[in-house]
């Protein structure tokens, strides 16, 4: 009669392998930034790759994670970008498509997630999940001409001990990284050299800078009121 002692061992091995497989669809809340909106009419295009982004760990030396970030990225950009501009046109066709034209819109933002990395507690020898994200931000004019192309990085971490599960901890680290990206873009978007130079040339075509025009309008109104009195 054959012994069945190998069966429990196989079951334990199966359970151990299953426990190392983690499925995660990232979810989070993203606050709207407090900033002075730029005097532009803007829109955004999210590529299919961004919306369907799913990171799957392929290394045999690491736990098997499958991390779906597309919906969280869309929620993040849908909250952040409209707050950066005085007018928001919503979703745009791909500015790289043939015969692209978006009349009345000044710029179209196209974010691309170019790199996604993470570190697990057993790898960093600490109780912390860490996430690094790198974005290639592309900026187009309403006629499809590329205006600016630059990279922005983001970092997030969370202590695993404060979470109910490793999935919750990883989720929180990614949400923190996206919020870090939001702070970076809010602070530096208007400082992108190509955008800044373009806006200066654009204002120069009208013969005034935006602050100068506003001051002149204020003085004209003051003089008119003085004459009426």
Image (tube, rainbow, N blue to C red):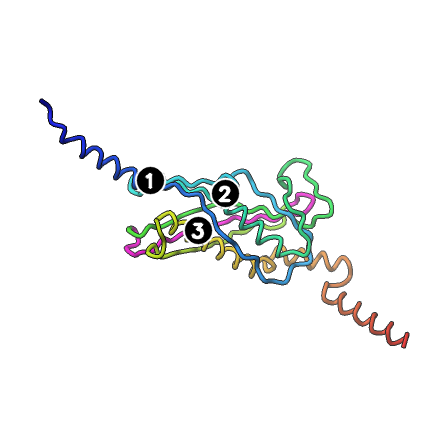
Q: Main secondary structure of the magenta part?
A: strand
Q: Which of marks 1 and 2 precedes in the sequence?
A: 1
Identify the mark at residue 70; answer none if there is no mark.
Answer: 2
Quarter of the picture holding the C terminus: bottom right
Residue under the image location 68 percent in, 39 percent down: 100
Of 30 and 99, nearer the camera is 30
The answer for how far apart the CA atoms under marks 2 and 1 are is 20 Å
For the residue carrying disc 1, how many other residues have a C-alpha within 10 Å: few (<14), some (14-19), or many (20+)? few
Residue under the image location 45 percent in, 46 percent down: 26
Of 167 and 42, nearer the camera is 167
Q: Which residue is mark 3?
A: 174
Residue 188 appears at what percent x and percent y?
A: 56, 60
Of 209 and 156, nearer the camera is 156
Residue reaching furthest to the top: 1
Residue under the image location 33 percent in, 40 percent down: 21
Q: Is residue 144 magenta?
A: yes
Q: Which residue is mark 1?
A: 21
Local secondary structure at mark 1: strand
Residue 173 appears at what percent x and percent y?
A: 41, 53
119 left or right of 78 in image: left
Please report the bounds of the magenta region as a residue range.
123-145
Q: Which of marks 3 and 1 precedes in the sequence?
A: 1
Of 72 and 57, nearer the camera is 72
Residue 45 appears at what percent x and percent y?
A: 60, 43
Residue 218 appears at what percent x and percent y?
A: 79, 70
> Pointer 1 and pointer 3: residues touching (CB < 8 Å)?
no
For the residue carrying disc 2, how many other residues have a C-alpha within 10 Å: few (<14), some (14-19), or many (20+)? many
Q: Which quadrant of the structure image shows residue 38? A: bottom right
């Amino acid at each position: 009669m054959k012994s069945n002692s190998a069966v429990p061992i196989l079951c334990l091995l199966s359970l151990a392998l299953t426990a190392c497989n983690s499925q995660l669809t990232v979810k989070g809340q993203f606050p709207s930034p407090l900033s002075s909106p730029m005097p532009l009419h803007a829109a955004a295009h999210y590529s299919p790759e961004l919306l369907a982004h799913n990171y799957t760990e392929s290394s045999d030396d690491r736990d098997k994670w499958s991390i779906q970030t597309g919906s969280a990225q869309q929620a993040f950009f849908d909250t952040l970008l409209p707050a950066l501009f005085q007018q928001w046109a919503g979703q745009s066709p791909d500015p790289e498509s043939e015969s692209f034209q978006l009349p009345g819109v000044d710029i179209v933002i196209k974010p691309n997630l170019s790199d996604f990395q993470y570190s697990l507690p057993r790898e960093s020898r600490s109780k912390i999940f860490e996430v690094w994200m790198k974005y290639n931000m592309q900026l187009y004019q309403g006629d499809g001409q590329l205006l600016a192309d630059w990279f922005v990085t983001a970092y997030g971490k969370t202590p695993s001990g404060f979470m109910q599960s490793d999935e919750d901890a990883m989720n929180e680290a990614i949400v923190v990284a996206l919020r870090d990206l939001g702070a970076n873009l809010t602070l530096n978007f208007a400082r992108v050299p190509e955008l800044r130079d373009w806006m200066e040339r654009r204002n120069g075509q009208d013969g005034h800078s935006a602050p100068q025009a506003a001051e002149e309008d204020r003085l004209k109104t003051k003089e008119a009121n003085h004459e009426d009195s």
